[in-house]
Structure formats: structure tokens, C-alpha cells
Image: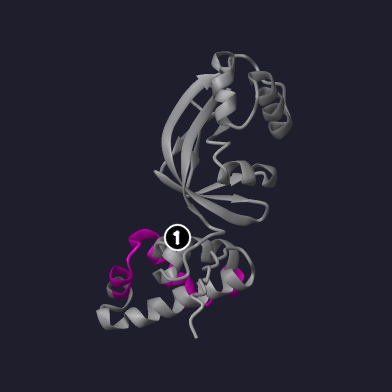
Amino acid sequence: MGEGRQRFLGRHLMVKGKFVDDILRGRKRATIRLGRVNVKYKELIVHGGGRPVAKVKVKNVVYKRVRELTDEDARLDGFRSVGELVAELEKVYGKKLSPDDYVTIIEFEVVQDLSKLEPEDPYLGLEPGDVARLGLRYLGDELSDEEKKILRDLTMTNSIRATAYRLYGDLGKRWRVRRVLRRVLNELLRRGLISAARRERRERGRR
């Protein structure tokens, strides 16, 4: 693959469903992709098995040729050896890799498990921009034009106040933005795409 050919990674990182558990348990702390990938953002939403699973922070991005990969690189990606890693890459990309092919190692850490969100936090502890991204990705066909406009703006501002002012010129219209966020959250919860952690109730034994 030519050195000048580059792909871009946006806010969403797609993985196979079989890797989800390893990511959430910290056994898979990187993803290795064929080619030179330009990672545009420091925080990404990871999707696997048809749902969003985690928000991660990108710690490091390294470009290597296949022949330069080490067993430590493979272990970061959840594999036991370079041989096992390369075999998986060839399976995914459907081609025999050359020792001179470039790969991108994207190292990350999980900062939020989307199956264990905090029910007592506003919007379950999610940033408004993250709620908006999930809504647009999974509920797009069911959203009105106004809802889509609000969510798209939130992906840029990550601020209820800023979006209300930008779209309506009035901070008093924040209720419109909040209403859309609540609807999106409720629908994501109803579909089981995200879930809140269960709060344990402690019985005091008092009568």
C-alpha cells in the first residue's frame, strides 16, 4: 500500500462483536488497521455487535510496516503473537499482506462503558455531543428534520446553550434541545443500545 495513501477515522470506531468483551475488560487496548489512518479526534465511540459499547480516549497513534510489528503490538490488540495478528488482518482485508504494507496502531483506553451509564447523572453522564452522535447513527430514519438539525449542531458545539443560541437566537429555547436529547436517550435505552447501571439498594433493616 503506497505511503501517500491515507484514510481518515472520524468519531466512530467499528470493531467486530467478538472483541467487545476484551475491550471492556482492558485486554484489547489497541486496534491495528491496514494502511495509514489519520485519527482526527482524541475521543471515539466504539461500536461492536450492532451497538455502541464504549467511549475511548486515544493515547497514541503509530505507523509501522508489517515487518516492524512486534508481539507486544499484537498483545495490545488482543492477540498472542504477530503471526496471529497478521492472519486476522489478512482475513479481515481479504488479501495477503506484504512485509512493506503500512499499518496504523491506534492505542486507546476506555473512559466510559456504555452498558453501565450512571442513572443519577444528567443524560446518564453522556456528553450532549455523544448523545447526538448516537441518535444520528442509530435513530436517523425516525428523527424529524428539526431534531436532526439540533443533533447535528450538538455534534459541533457539545453545548445545549450554544446550540439553542445558534439555532434559535434565544437561550430560552434550551428546552427544545433538552427535549430532543431526552427523546434520543429514552429510545436508545428502550432498544437496549445503551443501558444504565443498576443501583444497589441497601436495606437498613429499620422498621
Q: Per the image, is 122 magenta?
A: no
Give the percent coordinates (x, y) of residue 119.
Answer: 47, 70
Task: Say if 123 sits above or below 75 in the image.
Answer: below
Give the percent coordinates (x, y) of residue 60.
Answer: 42, 32
SS type, badge 1: helix
Numbered label tally: 1
Give the percent coordinates (x, y) of residue 185.
Answer: 51, 71
Query: Over which residues does the magenta segment extend?
Result: 140-164
Q: Residue furthest bottom?
A: 207
Residue 27 in sight: yes
- Seen at 43% across and 71% down, the residue is 120
Residue 40 lies in quadrant? top left
- Seen at 61% across and 63% down, the residue is 193
The image's colouring method is: one colour
State the residue position of label 1.
130
Q: Per the image, is 154 magenta?
A: yes
Q: Which residue type does callout 1 highlight?
A: Asp
Q: Residues within 10 Å of mark 1 (few under 14, many from 20)?
A: some
- Seen at 48% across and 81% down, the residue is 206
Residue 3 in sight: no
- Look at the image and tell me in which quarter the N terminus lies: top right
Task: Say if 26 sits above or below 84 in the image.
Answer: below
| Prevailing secondary structure class for the magenta stretch in the rendered image | helix
Give the percent coordinates (x, y) of residue 95.
Answer: 72, 26
Q: In front here: 194 or 174?
A: 194
Residue 89 lies in quadrant? top right
